[in-house]
Image (cartoon, rainbow, N blue to C red):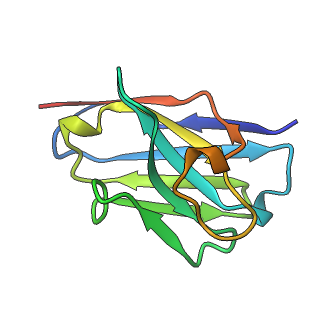
Amino acid sequence: QVQLVESGGGLVQAGDSLRLSCTASGFIFRLYTMGWFRQAPGQEREFVAAITWSGNSQRYSDSVKGRFTISRDNLKNAVYMQMNSLKPEDTAIYYCARGPRVGISYGKGDYDNWGQGTQVTVSS
């Protein structure tokens, strides 16, 4: 049974940093692209970042590029997202998701398993 568990969210002020973690189990983690998505109240779930199975390639949405960094540790079955220079518009529930085995997709339809999410709130 695939399981993804996020942690690391919280309430911070604008300009602060947070590091999200996602621990995976129930599948061969090192074979899959992993992604982070977020969903703000009343909005669609949107792509934030993704990383290929090897960790050699990453993609980011334009809104977080240069501020967020995705990484992974295949020995620990974990994917991380370092979020710097946080803004109030980054406020959302952040979800970890399992992506395809090859390449990186920006579409949430290509991600087949999701965590329960972790809340990030950035005050101005």
Q: Residue at x 48, y 61 (%)?
A: 70
Task: Measuring from the top left, give residue 43's x and y in whole percent.
Answer: 36, 28
Give the image quarter of residue 55: bottom right
Quadrant position of the C terminus in the picture: top left
Q: Residue furthest bottom?
A: 56
Which residue, as the protein is rendered here, is positioned at the far top? 42
User: Quadrant location of residue 32?
Assistant: bottom right
Residue projecting furthest to the left = 124
Give the answer, above or below, for where 103 lies relative to 115.
below
Q: Is residue 52 visible?
A: yes
Give 46 or 1, whichever is nearer the viewer. Answer: 46
Is residue 10 visible to us here? Answer: no
Of residues 113 and 107, the one nearer the viewer is: 107
Point out the image quarter for the N terminus: top right
Direction from residue 18 to residue 105 in the image, left or right: right
To which quarter of the image does residue 14 belong? top left
* Residue 100 image position (x, y, % from top left): 71, 59
Instruction: Work out whether 109 lies above or below 119.
Output: below
Give the number of marks: 0
Lateral position of residue 87 relative to residue 121, left or right: left
- Which residue is at a point 58% across and 43% down the rendered structure image? 96
Residue at (75%, 64%) from the top-left corner? 101
The percent coordinates of residue 48 (x first, y second) are 43, 51
Image position of 58 (left or right of 24): left
* Residue at point 46%, 35% (across, down): 45
Residue 12 place in picture, x, y as percent: 25, 33
19 over 117 or under it: above or below: below
